């Protein structure tokens, strides 16, 4: 230590005899103190100097003591964290029990003047109680919001669940909750988005959920697999990934589950149903029907005949037959719609989807008047949830306008579409398949209506925009809509594309 040597040399050279070392032995003793890492007499160091020299002399012992101290501190910290977590889980359980007790009490006919509350109405009252209770800890409030949000989602009311689940997700993030809790909250929010037909948001949230769950110590692989299966389904709907790739991954999941003797049957039927949807979208109708039928058969062994969980698997079975057996698909859709209306409080996005698919199946069969009736109802229902699922609403609206046009009701088609053209342009930028195809189909209808009025220039403008949209996003635009746009543009005679026999005006 140079400072010690400097102090010793300076002390030895001081002019006043009383300030120097008394003799050579004293000087040697101070030098030995330095070599032994002891405090030297030439320095009048403070306590920290003496402590430092002590540590230098006893490095091994101090290091061992420090390590033990760190371990003890870490143990104490971990123990304290566990106690806090235990107390928090206890608070959550108590709050949830009190909350559920309150819901049952609110639903008691003696408190509601003899009227019986539906489950949805009881959840509505629960939300009001949560809003009135400002004293809940953030993670306790998040747990209650998650419970109510999941309840709404189970009732096919994803639109009501979304704001509650988003609030729960934000609370958990601000509280730095563990990845497992945050991943489960994200998974619940993904499901609500998907049920509300906002599949673009569902895909983003699903990827976030998987990333959090994969970071969570001890996360159940099947929990992650469940989110993955449903995320792949959302990608099918959004249309942002090749169907072959999505189907291959779902096929791999199905095969892996079938090899396991302990596989959760609900996971298997979810994967089978998603695979059926992917195969149906790719035009593999026979394979899709086999997978959908198998999923429905297993689902019937898991759920009672009136269980709403069966609705999705019945829907998938009908969807897989839209081309191969449209009569059976129509009958299945009509049964589902009747069952739905008899058991639910009111319209939901799911009802809008069933009505829309009924209308599109009737369209394929050439039953245009019936298709219009179904799509009119679908548009009214979808319009109620347009703030949550604008892309689906615009796609249904464009399908209804196309049916008007086929029936010679051009004025109604134009009146329906013209106010929405700016919205279809905005929606197409989100690039979901519903948005892209809704815009292309709407522009084609506007072009056809202009041709009927004899306005070739306006028709060419609309057909040209439709064709440009289809070519800008060929991965999401239906080939039939692109072909219709190209044929319409040719028929105007205002351009010289590859249109044999047409002259340029």
Image (cartoon, rainbow, N blue to C red):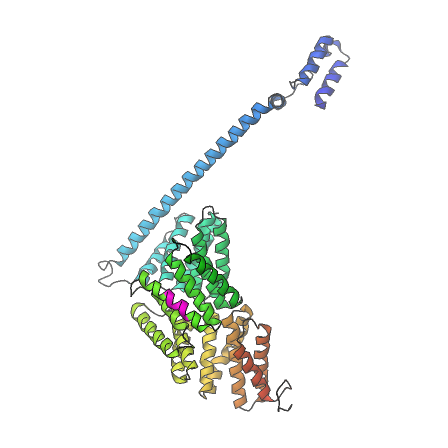
Left/right placement of residue 64 relative to residue 121 reads: right
Residue 47 vertical placement versus 145 (above, below): above
Q: How many marks?
A: 0
Nearer-the-camera pick, 366 or 6: 366
Q: Is residue 260 left or right of residue 207?
A: left
Check if residue 48 falls in the magenta segment: no
| Percent position of residue 505, x then y | 64, 91
Does residue 40 appear in this view?
no
Residue visible at 55% across and 26% down? 64
- In the figure, 459 relative to 129: above or below? below
Task: List x then y, in percent, for residue 34.
Answer: 68, 18
Q: Quadrant of residue 27?
A: top right
* Whether residue 87 is situated above or below residue 157 in the rendered picture: above
Residue 122 in sight here: yes
Which quadrant holds residue 285? Answer: bottom left
In reply to whether residue 294 is colored magenta, the answer given is yes
Q: Measured along the vertical axis of the image, is residue 355 above or below residue 249?
A: below
* Residue positioned 30% across, 55% down in the render: 103
Magenta-highlighted residues: 289-295
> Residue 140 in the image: x percent, y percent?
39, 49
Between residue 160 and residue 322, name the one nearer to us.
322
Where's the N terminus, which quadrant? top right
The foreground one among 241 and 203 is 241
Residue 345 pos. (x, y %): 32, 67
Query: Magenta stretch: dominant SS?
Result: helix
């Amino acid at each position: 230590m140079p400072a010690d040597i400097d102090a010793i040399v300076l002390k030895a050279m001081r002019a006043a005899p009383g300030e120097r070392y008394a003799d050579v032995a004293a000087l040697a003793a101070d030098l030995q103190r330095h070599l032994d890492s002891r405090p030297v007499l030439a320095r009048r160091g403070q306590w920290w100097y003496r402590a430092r020299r002590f540590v230098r002399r006893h490095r091994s012992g101090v290091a061992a003591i420090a390590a033990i101290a760190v371990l003890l501190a870490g143990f104490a910290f971990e123990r304290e964290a566990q106690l806090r977590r235990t107390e928090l889980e206890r608070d959550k359980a108590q709050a949830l029990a009190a909350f559920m007790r309150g819901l049952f009490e609110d639903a008691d006919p003696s408190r509601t003047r003899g009227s019986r509350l539906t489950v949805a109405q009881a959840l509505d009252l629960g939300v009001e109680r949560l809003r009135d209770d400002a004293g809940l800890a953030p993670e306790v409030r998040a747990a209650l919001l998650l419970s109510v949000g999941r309840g709404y989602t189970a009732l096919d009311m994803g639109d009501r669940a979304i704001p509650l689940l988003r609030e729960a997700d934000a609370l958990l993030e601000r509280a730095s909750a563990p990845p497992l809790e945050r991943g489960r909250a994200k998974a619940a929010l993904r499901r609500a988005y998907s049920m509300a037909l906002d599949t673009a948001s569902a895909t983003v949230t699903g990827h976030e959920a998987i990333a959090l769950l994969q970071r969570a110590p001890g996360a159940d692989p099947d929990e992650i697999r469940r989110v993955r299966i449903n995320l792949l389904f959302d990608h099918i709907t959004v249309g942002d990934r090749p169907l072959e790739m999505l189907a291959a991954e779902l096929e791999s999941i199905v095969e892996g589950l079938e090899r396991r003797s302990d596989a959760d049957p609900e996971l298997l039927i979810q994967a089978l149903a998603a695979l059926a949807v992917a195969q149906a979208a790719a035009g593999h109708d026979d394979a899709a029907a086999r997978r959908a039928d198998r999923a429905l058969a297993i689902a019937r062994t898991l759920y009672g005949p009136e269980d709403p969980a069966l609705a999705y698997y019945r829907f998938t079975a009908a969807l897989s037959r839209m081309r191969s057996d449209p009569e059976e698909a129509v009958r299945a859709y009509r049964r589902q719609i009747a069952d739905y209306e008899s058991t639910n409080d009111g319209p939901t996005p799911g009802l809008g989807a069933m009505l829309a698919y009924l209308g599109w199946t009737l369209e394929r069969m050439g039953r245009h008047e019936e298709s219009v009736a179904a799509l009119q109802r679908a548009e009214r229902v979808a319009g109620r949830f347009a703030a949550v699922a604008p892309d689906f609403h615009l796609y249904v609206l464009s399908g209804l306008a196309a049916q008007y046009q086929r029936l010679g009701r051009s004025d109604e088609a134009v009146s329906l579409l013209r106010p929405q053209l700016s919205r279809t342009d905005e929606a197409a930028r989100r690039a979901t398949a519903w948005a892209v195809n809704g815009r292309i189909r709407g522009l084609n209808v506007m072009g056809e209506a202009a041709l009927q009025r004899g306005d070739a220039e306006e028709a060419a403008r609309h057909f040209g925009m439709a064709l440009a949209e289809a070519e800008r996003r060929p991965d999401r635009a239906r080939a039939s809509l692109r072909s219709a746009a190209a044929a319409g543009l040719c028929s105007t005679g205002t351009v010289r594309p590859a249109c044999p026999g047409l002259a340029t005006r």
